[in-house]
Image (spheres, grey):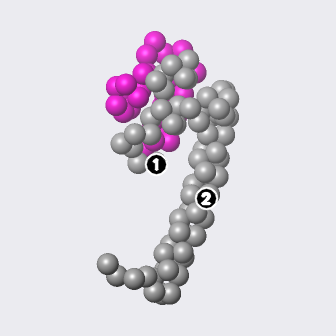
Amino acid sequence: MERPNTRSILEWYRDDVASMYAAHSWYTIAQREARRLARETGTTRARAAGVIAALSPLQTWTGNVDAAGRVLRAAARGDEGPPAVGLRRNVAKAWAIAT
């Protein structure tokens, strides 16, 4: 097994710090998107965030936000059911949260 040297330790540390900053930025962006969707659809930020979370598996971030917006708009219109925007079980969860 190779012994770590100063350079490899510093590289790992820099990568870890960069990951922490990226993660922190992602949460800020996610909160902003939840707030925007809530405002656009007349719901709460917590509900919008819940819909985003429910739809997230196997979605890109852009696709996830788009799908959440579609579910929230359908709920706001009073549609009888959700649009087909992801995995059936996840869409059912998102719909339950939205309605």
Magenta highlight: main SS: helix
Mark carried by residue 25: 2
Q: Which residues are magenta?
A: 63-92
Per the image, is 81 magenta? yes
Q: Is residue 29 above or below residue 54?
A: below
Per the image, is 93 magenta? no
Q: Nearer the viewer, residue 74 or 47?
A: 47
Which-is-in-front pick, marks 1 and 2? 2
Mark carried by residue 79: none
Name which residue type carries label 2.
Answer: Ser
Residue 75 visible in the shown view: no
Q: Residues within 10 Å of mark 2 (few under 14, many from 20)?
A: few
State the image coordinates of residue 3 (x, y, percent, origin top left).
39, 83
- Secondary structure beneath label 1: helix
- At horizontal 50% and vertical 87% (from top left) the residue drawn is 6
Q: Nearer the viewer, residue 83 or 20?
A: 20
Q: Which residue is mark 1?
A: 61
Is residue 39 rendered to the left or right of residue 96?
Answer: right
Q: Nearer the viewer, residue 86 or 78?
A: 86
